[in-house]
Amino acid sequence: MTQTLEGLLDDFRTHTILGAWVDERLVGSVRGRCEDGVCHVGRLVVHPDFRRRGIGAALMAAIEAVHPAAACHELFTGERSERNLRLYDRLGYRCVGLQVVSPRLTLVLLRKKRA
């Protein structure tokens, strides 16, 4: 996953971006933006050395909490991203659609309704 500096700066203007820090080291981040009552969550990342410690789940809880007025939260991931799909399932996200991008890439659209 790559992003230009211009794209990143644009995201800072349009999204809420949260980071997870261990000491002075950034080890994870997530971003989200609300539109028409839907919080679109994206780019959840955790450094490989810090995975399986609850950081991803904590970042997801934090981005959901930042947007309490959202009726639901949506995100997408690759259908072969088994770890991601397990995490999102544990957090209450459910598949609401698939998008075939290419013969080698299908995205899974996931949604979690506000309780």
Image (tube, grey):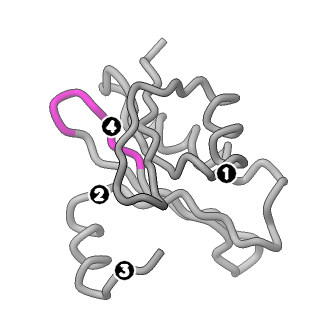
> Which badge, 1 or 3, comes first in the chain's sequence?
3
Q: Which residues are magenta?
A: 35-41
Q: Is residue 36 located in the magenta-colored stretch of the structure?
A: yes
Disc nearest the viewer among 1 and 3: 3
Identify which amino acid the numbered label 4 is placed on: Cys
Secondary structure beneath disc 1? helix
Marks 1 and 3: CB-CB under 8 Å?
Answer: no
Secondary structure beneath disc 3? loop
> Which badge, 4 or 2, comes first in the chain's sequence?
2
Mark 3 and mark 4: Cα distance apart in space: 21 Å
Tell me the residue at 48%/61% (across/down): 104
Q: Neighbour class for label 2 at 10 Å: few (<14), some, many (≥20)? A: some
Q: How many marks?
A: 4
Give residue 3's mark: 3
Q: Neighbour class for label 1 at 10 Å: few (<14), some, many (≥20)? A: many
Marks 3 and 4: CB-CB under 8 Å?
Answer: no
Q: Which residue is mark 4?
A: 39
Q: Looking at this rendering, what residue extends furthest in the bottom direction?
A: 5
